Image (cartoon, grey):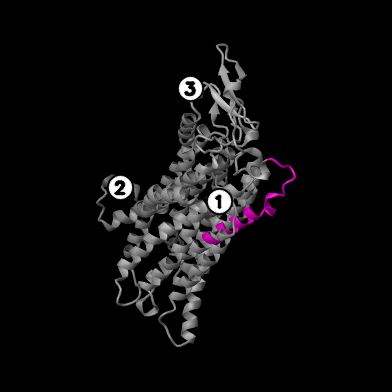
Amino acid sequence: MGMGRLWDQVKQHMLWTLFPIWYTHFTQGLQTTLPYVIGVYMVRDFLSKKEEVSEKEVGFLTGVLGATFCFAQTLTSFLLGKLSDRVGRKPIIVLGNVSCAVFVLLFGLSGNFVHACVTRLCMGATNGIIGAEKAVIGEGLPRKDQSEAIGYISMTWGLGTLVGPMIGGVLAHPCGFVTEQNNVVGEEGDMACEDGSLLARKPFFLPCLAASLLSVVAVFLTAVFLEETLPSKQKAGYEQVAVQEDPETGHDGRVAAMYKKNSDLFRYQNEVELSGTIKSHHHTDDGTDTLDEDNNQEENYSVDPGQSAADNDASHPPWYKQRAVQLSLTGYALIAFCYIILDELVPIFASAPLSEGGLAFSPSKLSGPLSFGGIVLIVWMLVGYKWMSKHYGTIRTCIYGLYMTLPTAMMFPLSSVGFLNAEVMLWTAVTFKYIAGTNAFTACIVLVNLAAPKESLGEVNGLGQTLASGVRALGPFLGGVMWASSIRLFAIMGNAWGHQFVPFALSALVAFCTLFIYYNIDISEE
């Protein structure tokens, strides 16, 4: 079997074995967006017994509830990443899935605001899934294919962000729906919603139950089918192919730990040693392995240019002192900050009155373009990003995404200009936002993996997740502050209109500054 054909089979096998990762990330997107959809209604329900409830109080408590999950992740993501470097990636991922299945159910059963916040805190504190997922890809796939794999992760996240709002919108307050429709659900529906019933007392239990069941499936898939990639925790019967470049395919051979010695796919298996000699494993009738070295099988393999000194030299500096790691993590945090701010600003801007520079859109009018954005993400990931990363490389794709962010950010406030069609402009801006974000955000995640030393993948990705979670926790607060500050600034200047351009311009400025990082980063993608 030729090395090129062998690699194609290896790649297909490994992408299939990573299916539990794709599904888990789908549930993570769903679990993240679901509380954003039902959170404000939960807060209103908790405050319904009060005589007077101000919108300011509702907004503040909703923001706190939304930030608790990411705040907890900020505290524990690095520790869980460090732990995964010792106990393995699989236990951390399984723990996170179990945590989501349990605590989202308790979230739906929350009887008060404190209870709801505690369940979200516990879920976030025990969820190190995303960092461990990236480490699995970093160990389990060659450098050239990590971009495609992380692209699938972004795509499944987009699918989750589509399903989460649908579940929340359809299943929340089922008894309220029955009442408003004059009991059209029927007699069984009436019994489920009679006074004192679970659905009547806990109107948000049903969507949380659905999310919990989806996470139970993720627990099963990761516990049973996900294979450990941390070399020190691989089971006997698995091998790690040596790190050398295959001259026929251009792949670096860093294909870790996903081959069973006795699998049908690998009845014999080529092992490329650092010396450049190919030794073939032959399986004898008695089940033992023999290792034959044939001079006719020897070929010269060039040393992988993407393999850093960190993989060979015990005296290399620790990962936190390596410039490539520092720059890639900084760029990751800044891109996350830029897009979290945009995610927060768009609904505020679209719902603001026309007199204050907004669009005065209703929630139903805004949900269309936002839901369409998830579809754009999936389609672009399958077609556009894959093509760009292949032809231009990961760094250039990230840079192009950041350049595209600059005009895209300003398209949103431009939709408030009178002579332009606001709806058309908003839909267009959302489309370009998801294309630019997919390019920049997916590429920067890949670069973190490529910069990290193999032995510290868990720690590096854990720190990256800590930074991203911190940004997500602060995003809702900072977005609101930027919007309110721009209003006050223009009020002092005696002009109530035009302030809407300021916060979006600041977001574009963050993207522009981030460009300098990726023009100065030096990471081999080969």
Disc 1 or 2, which lies upstream in sequence? 2
Q: What residue lies at 54% left-to-right and 31% top-to-bottom?
A: 258
Q: Position of residue 495 (x, y in %)?
A: 43, 85
Q: Which x, y percent locates residue 459? A: 64, 48
Region of the chain picked out in magenta, as a range? 312-335
Residue 49 painted magenta: no
Q: The residue under label 2 is which amino acid type?
A: Gly
Q: In the orientation shown, which residue stands out farthest toward the top?
A: 286
Question: Which residue is label 3 attached to?
Answer: 264
Quarter assignment of residue 278: top right
Q: Quick one: 197 or 214, which is closer to the camera?
A: 214
Instruction: Give x and y (percent) for residue 198.
Output: 41, 49
User: Dot 1, how many residues are within 10 Å of its Cα: few (below 14), some (14-19), or many (20+)?
Assistant: many
Q: Residue at x 68, y 44 (%)?
A: 310
169 above or below 6? below
Residue 99 sits above or below residue 498 on the image:
above
Residue type at tag 1 = Leu
Furthest toward the right, the residue is 315
